[in-house]
Image: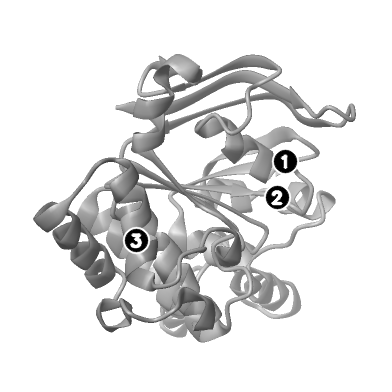
Amino acid sequence: MELIKVAGVSYTYSDGHQALKNVSLNITKGERIAVLGPNGAGKSTLFQLFNGLLQATSGSVTVKGLPVCKEHMPEIRSSIGMVFQDSDDQLFNSTVRQEIAYGLMNMRVKGTALDEAINWALEVVGMQDYGAKSPHNLSGGEKKRVALASVLAMKPEVLVLDEPTAALDPRGVSKLIRLLNSINRDLGITLIFATHDVDIVPLLADRVYLLSKGEIVLGGSTAEVFSHKETIRQIDLRLPRVAHLAELLARDSSLNIVNLPLTIGQAKHLLEQDKFGAVL
């Protein structure tokens, strides 16, 4: 089922800056989609078109077949949950529990149903014991989980995350990747995330759109997109570190690596094959 369709969309800000140029993409139910690009590529602008925070200057955006316009905004915004890059922009209540309750209460959820939804969301993100705490006193990773819980509580079909690993330490990044993959796998929620951190993309995405200066320059599976090494480097990005290491090994040794590994697991498998004389 096609959840989001962006067709020939351009967007120009009031100061004349054209952030998006003739962008087209399709996202179907259950996918994990990365929008990869350097800072200023237009990733955040694109995401704000999905739920009507911005309206396209030209072209069209539809969600579940509905044009993104004022008439359909309630249904569209109940289907798409947004998690901002900076959790402090999203958290403003005095306790974690109140934070998660806020959106639900605006949807007129009350009583036992409200309590159950809050408890469920806290459990999903592993924050069951944090309900009475102030979100402003939490670590960056904990704030990210609370922001995520506040969106999940409203049971969206699509979860849109802008730079989800920004400001997280390596352990926090690892935990968040596992959590997001479990949300996609166990809850069937479609994931769309924007990032310039190429190392997380193979761990969290099935398909990738490469965005540069407001235009999509590549789209396809994760392996397909990362096979275009020169294009990636031309727009000031790089290969995942594992792939770059394999590239250097292939250049400076006798290893014959046909398809660059993108994760540590893939690299381990290929090196084990080479140990027994297989072609990499």
Amino acid of disc 2: Gly
**Residue on which disc 2 sits:** 37
Q: Nearer the viewer, residue 142 or 210?
A: 142
Foreground tag (1 vs 3): 3
Picture quadrant of residue 7 = top right
**Residue 34 pos. (x, y %):** 53, 49
Residue sitting at x 34%, y 36%? 78
Q: Quadrant of the N terminus?
A: top left
Residue sitting at x 43%, y 49%? 206
Q: Are marks 1 and 3 in contact (CB under 8 Å)?
A: no
**Residue on which disc 1 sits:** 42
Tell me if residue 119 comes above or below residue 75 in the rendering: below
Q: Are marks 2 and 1 in contact (CB under 8 Å)?
A: yes
Is 184 on the left-hand or right-hand side of 91? left
For label 3, the SS is helix
Tell me if residue 220 comes above or below residue 65 in the rendering: below
Residue sitting at x 73%, y 32%? 215
Q: CA distance from mark 1 to mark 3?
A: 29 Å
Q: CA distance from mark 3 to mark 2?
A: 31 Å
Mark with earlier residue (3, 2): 2
Q: Would residue 65 be visible to someone looking at this image?
A: yes
Picture quadrant of residue 114 = bottom left
Foreground tag (2 vs 1): 1
Residue that sits furthest to the left in the current view:
112
Packing grade of label 2 (10 A; few <14, some 14-19, many >=20) is many
Q: Nearer the viewer, residue 254 or 28?
A: 28
**Residue 262 pos. (x, y %):** 54, 66
**Residue 221 pos. (x, y %):** 49, 45
**Residue on which disc 3 sits:** 100
Amino acid of disc 1: Gly
